[in-house]
Image (cartoon, rainbow, N blue to C red):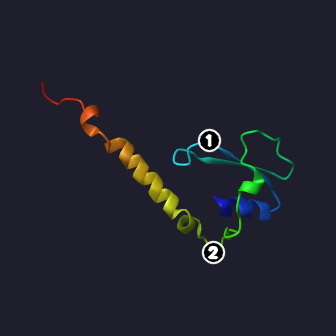
Amino acid sequence: MRSIYKTFLASGFKVEVLPTDPDPNQRNLLFYASLENVKQDPGFIPVDKIDLADAVILKDEYPVLDMLNSEAAKRWRMLAIGSFTGDIEQRTLPLFE
């Protein structure tokens, strides 16, 4: 997501990022991008907390977003599978009485 942020900045946008949940395993990031200043919100991630050192600017001729996001997508899938299969004995309905 840092590369998306860096790409917005490189394109001339003013950008703020709002997490939807405090838990990194449960949240999405909402990007507020505008050519004008974005109205400040106390929930925005402070700009100085976003490390762009190894983030890349995304370009059409070199599409790498899926590669960059693969670890996060894998982690999300594992958490989703765990939430559906964890403690399955307590969550199943009896098929026969």
Q: Is 68 placed left or right of 45 in the picture?
A: left
Secondary structure type for disc 1: loop
Residue on which the image places disc 1:
20
Which of 97 and 21 lies nearest the eye of the viewer? 21
Q: Where is residue 18 in the image (x, y as percent from the top left)?
A: 69, 45
Q: Which amino acid type is shown beneath numbered disc 2?
A: Tyr
Crowd band around label 2 with a 10 angstrom C-alpha radius: few (<14), some (14–19), many (20+): few
Q: Is 52 placed left or right of 27 in the picture?
A: right
Please report the residue visible at 50 percent of the width from the left and 62 percent of the height from the top.
71
Which numbered disc, 1 or 2, marks the residue that appears first in the sequence?
A: 1
Q: Which numbered tag is attached to residue 74?
A: none
Tell me the quadrant of the picture where the C terminus can be found: top left
Please report the residue visible at 35 percent of the width from the left and 42 percent of the height from the top.
84
Tell me the quadrant of the picture where the N terminus can be found: bottom right
Give the vertical position of 12 relative to 81 (above or below): below
- Which residue sits furthest bottom? 61
Residue on which the image places disc 2:
62
Give the vertical position of 26 relative to 55 (above or below): above
Using the numbered discs, state the Cα–Cα distance from disc 1 to disc 2 in whole angstroms.
Answer: 29 Å
- Which residue sits furthest left? 97
Q: Is 96 placed left or right of 64 in the picture?
A: left
Which mark is nearer the camera, 1 or 2? 1
Q: Where is residue 37 in the image (x, y as percent from the top left)?
A: 86, 48
Please report the residue visible at 83 percent of the width from the left and 41 percent of the height from the top.
39
Secondary structure type for disc 2: loop
Q: Which of the 4 quarters of the picture holds residue 88?
A: top left
Q: Position of residue 34 (x, y in %)?
A: 81, 50
- Which residue sits furthest front? 49
Q: Which amino acid type is shown beneath numbered disc 1?
A: Thr
Q: Where is residue 89 in the image (x, y as percent from the top left)?
A: 24, 36
Q: Is 50 placed left or right of 93 in the picture?
A: right
Which of 25 and 31 lies nearest the eye of the viewer? 25
